[in-house]
Amino acid sequence: MAANPKYKPAGNLSWLVCTLYIVFLLLPIYWLVNMSFKENSEITGAFALWPHSPTLRNYTVIFTDPSWYNGYINSIIYVALNTLISVSAALPAAYAFSRYRFLGDKHLFFWLLTNRMAPPAVFALPFFQLYSAFGLIDTHIAVALAHCLFNVPLAVWILEGFMSGVPKEIDETAYIDGYSFPRFFVKIFMPLIASGIGVAGFFCFMFSWVELLLARTLTTTAAKPISAIMTRTVSAAGMDWGVLAAAGVLTIVPGALVIYFVRNYIAKGFALGRV
Amino acid sequence: MEKTWNNKAWFLVTPVLLLVAFSAVIPLMTVVNYSVQDTFGNNEFFWAGTDWFVQMLHSSRFWDALVRNLIFSFVILLIEIPLGIFIALNMPKHGIGVPVCLVLMALPLLIPWNVVGTIWQVFGRVDIGLLGHALEAIGIDYNYVRNPSDAWATVILMDVWHWTSLVVLLCYAGLVSIPDAYYQAAKIDGASRWAVFRYIQLPKMKRVLLIAVLLRFMDSFMIYTEPFVVTGGGPGNSTTFLSIDLVKMAIGQFDLGPAAAMSIIYFLIILLMSWVFYTVMTSSDADA
């Protein structure tokens, strides 16, 4: 394409389009970061484009108060649990869908997909009752299991796409060489689709991390996610905007880190069109 | 790929089946159960038949929320899809710009949904927000708390901010899969920029675009957290979409019967959409 300037997208203005779009994306985020470094009096008092007397007070509040930082720990625990459960349950299933035809396979696949499309609002109340019956309310595993509703189908879908790209001859050769199925799967097959596992894990992480409705419904105190804790910054003294902003900024950080590490795989995951 | 017929594959599917049965089938059965019963409390239920469904289908509250949700979905599709294509066409294809663009553009996708709501709630406030302040400074009377049309504008702008990147990334993935030879052939034929887009890039993006449209439709059809945080469904009921209405009914008012009936109707609509989605997907798989 470089040797072909005529078809360079929209000529020399293309960088401008991207820059403008990115500025549009970053402005609201910048505003939150800006607020997180201000005192409350400065936020509500004068209007300033950057903090005139930067303070770390808001972040100190979060890092010294267990009810705040436990929220982050809770979120990370159930997100990690969910990613682990979803991907490990989805691996054999995706293999079955990519290699075999079996009774009701298409219906099963479709039924799995409908769960990805199911509105969490429909499930909030029944989930609460089901998990109450099992005594699971306010535990990390409850949220992790609830998020399987949309993450397991997603993981199956993504992994099936990657597995279908691996030629079947590899399986057959391995069986002839005397590999048992579990040994073949772990030793040979999983390394071959490592990037697929990465992409699936990334999307499970992402959708579990951003979900609030179910996570909030199923927890009260011990496993409450950070995003639910954020809603309690209204105190007698009014809204604690600074701490709210700092908490918001800190919820963006894990996502930004993860996306940085998987940036090269993301385009591939999207290319499969299976998100 | 040629697949062998093997019913033992069911063993491999069993873990997923159990997991999803626990997190989807049992809850759904609870909903079905509530939708046909009435209660006076104390866990005493009696048969109500299809009363709740009839009531729901005659309730203007349900239809209003449905219509609002449909309008919302179509407006955001109308903005996000063309905008996403346009930006994807302008993305750099080589060099340091690629990862920078990818990471920065994907950023909004990874922010928890209620934080997205918080960001825009703050950003749009006239007293402390940049957007609200700027609009006021140029003389536009803007207040998303009081004015329904401002609330709509905020919610739509927020959704564009939040999800256009998904369309961009999907389209970009479709674009980079086009071999250079196509462009060289087009150059030899002296094709115009528009012709290149219309006959090379658009057909190659067809599949991912389809996915983008359907995913965005589906997700905007069950949107809850972001508008709830920003507007709480208000002012009045002007931004009360289906999910917000449902949660209000089920958890706020504890009207189990109507809420369950609404869930079933809602779910059936989604099921229909998923079926269309799946059919279109698999038939385009066959084309490729």
Image: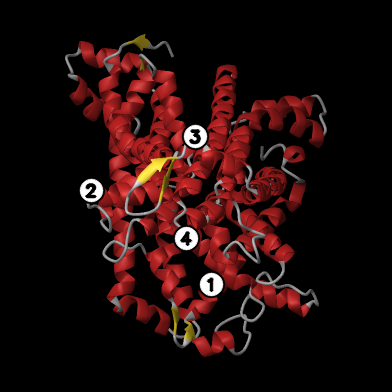
The residue mark sitting in front, 2 or 4, is 4
Relative horizontal placement of residue A259, taking residue B57 as reference (left or right)? left
Q: Is residue B149 above or below residue B281?
A: below
- In depth, the one of B39 and A263 nearer the eye is B39
Element carrying mark 3? loop
Q: List the residue tagged with mark 2.
A: A134
User: Tag 3, which chain?
Assistant: A
- For residue A274, the mark is 3
Is residue B266 at least partly visible in the picture?
A: no
> How far, Cα to Cα, is label 1 from label 3?
32 Å
Q: Which residue is mark 4?
A: B252
Q: Chain of mark 1?
A: A
Please state which amino acid type lies under the numbered disc 4.
Answer: Gly
Residue A209 locus on image (x, y percent): 40, 54
The residue at 50%/32% (across/down) is A272
For label 1, the SS is: helix
Amino acid marked by disc 2: Phe
